[in-house]
Image (cartoon, helix red, strand yellow):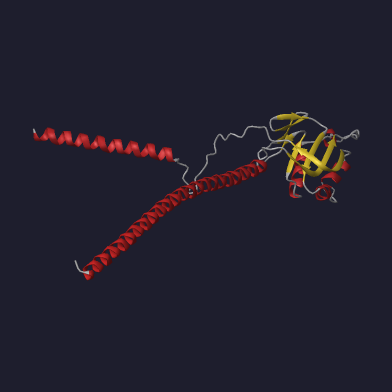
C-alpha cells in the first residue's frame, strides 16, 4: 500500500466520522424540537379548555343576570299595577278628614236629614280629593277604587258592601296643601257642610296610611277582549278547528262509502 492510498483512507475515515457526528446531532436536535412541540400543544390544549370553561361560566352568569333583570322589571311593573288597582297598602303625605253629623237641632219645618251626612256628601268629598290629585283614598278603613260603591242604606252608608256610620274618617295620600285647599274652596264642599252645622276637621300629615282593597273583583258579564277585537281564546279556536276537521273527515268517509256502494 502506498503512502498516498493510506492518506486517502484516513481522510475518508475522518470525513465519515464528522458526517456521522453531524447526523447524530441533527437527529438529537430534531427529537428535542419534537418533544418541545408536543409539550407546547398539550399546554395550549389545556389552556384552551380553561378558557372555554371560563367562557361557559360567564355566559351562564350573563344569562342569569339578564333573566334577573327581566324578572325584576316584570315584578316592578306588576307592583305598580297592583298599587294603581288598590291592591297594596299605601303610605305617604296627605290629609285626614273627619266629618260627623251636625249637632244642631233642626228648625221648625226643616228636614232633619239636612243635618246628617249622606252618600252624596261623601261622594263630593271623594271627587274633590281625586280631582286635586289624591293617589289613594280610604273611607273608615275601606280602600276606595273605581268600582267602590258609596250609597245610603237606612241610617248607614254602604261602602265596598260594608255598612259604615258616622263619624266618617277619610284618609287621602297626595300633596297635603293642595288636597286641603281643594276642600276649603269658597263655595266648596266644606263650606256647605259648615252651613248645615256638619262637623269637619282637616289635618295634614306626613304619614297617612291607606289599606289595600279587600273586596271581590270578579267580572260577571265583562270578558277580556284581545287586541284584534275578538274575545275568542286560542283554546276555543283550536277546538273549533278540530271539530271542523272531524266533520270534514266524516263527510269524506261517508262519501267514499256511498261511492263504493254505488259501484257494487
Residue 244 on image: x %, y %: 32, 38
Q: Quadrant of the N terminus?
A: bottom left
Residue 159 on image: x %, y %: 72, 33
Residue 82 sits in which quadrant?
Answer: top right
Query: In this figure, what is the number of numbered marks?
Result: 0
Relative to the observer, which residue lies in front, 77 or 31?
Answer: 31
Q: Is residue 106 left or right of residue 230?
A: right
Residue 38 on image: x %, y %: 39, 52
Residue 197 sits in which quadrant?
Answer: top right
Q: Is residue 107 left or right of residue 90?
A: right
Direction left: furthest residue: 264
Relative to the observer, which residue lies in front, 187 or 162?
Answer: 162
Relative to the observer, which residue lies in front, 239 or 126?
Answer: 239
Which residue is at a point 77% across and 38% down the rendered structure image?
209
Relative to the observer, which residue lies in front, 52 or 140?
Answer: 52
Q: Quadrant of the C terminus?
A: top left
Residue 167 on image: x %, y %: 83, 32
Which residue is at a point 43% across and 53% down the rendered structure image?
40
Amino acid at each position: 500500500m502506498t503512502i498516498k492510498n493510506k492518506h486517502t483512507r484516513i481522510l475518508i475515515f475522518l470525513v465519515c466520522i464528522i458526517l456521522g457526528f453531524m447526523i447524530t446531532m441533527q437527529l438529537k436536535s430534531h427529537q428535542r424540537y419534537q418533544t418541545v412541540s408536543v409539550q407546547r400543544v398539550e399546554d395550549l390544549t389545556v389552556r384552551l379548555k380553561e378558557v372555554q370553561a371560563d367562557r361557559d361560566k360567564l355566559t351562564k352568569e350573563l344569562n342569569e343576570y339578564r333573566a334577573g333583570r327581566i324578572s325584576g322589571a316584570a315584578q316592578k311593573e306588576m307592583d305598580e299595577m297592583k298599587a294603581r288597582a288598590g291592591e297594596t297598602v299605601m303610605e305617604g303625605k296627605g290629609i285626614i278628614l273627619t266629618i260627623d253629623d251636625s249637632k244642631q237641632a233642626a228648625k221648625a219645618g226643616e228636614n232633619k236629614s239636612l243635618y246628617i251626612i249622606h252618600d252624596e256628601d261623601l261622594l263630593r268629598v271623594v271627587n274633590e280629593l281625586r280631582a286635586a290629585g289624591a293617589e289613594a283614598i280610604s273611607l273608615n278603613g275601606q280602600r276606595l277604587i273605581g268600582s267602590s260603591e258609596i250609597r245610603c242604606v237606612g241610617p248607614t252608608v254602604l261602602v265596598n258592601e260594608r255598612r259604615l256610620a258616622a263619624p266618617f274618617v277619610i284618609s287621602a295620600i297626595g300633596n297635603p296643601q293642595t288636597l286641603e285647599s281643594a276642600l276649603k274652596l269658597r263655595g266648596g264642599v266644606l263650606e256647605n257642610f259648615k252651613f248645615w252645622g256638619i262637623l269637619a276637621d282637616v289635618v295634614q300629615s306626613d304619614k297617612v296610611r291607606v289599606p289595600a282593597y279587600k273586596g271581590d273583583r270578579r267580572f260577571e258579564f265583562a270578558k277580556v277582549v284581545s287586541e284584534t277585537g275578538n274575545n275568542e281564546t286560542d283554546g276555543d279556536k283550536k277546538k273549533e278547528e278540530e271539530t271542523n276537521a272531524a266533520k270534514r273527515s266524516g263527510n269524506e268517509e261517508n262519501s267514499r262509502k256511498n261511492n263504493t256502494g254505488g259501484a257494487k
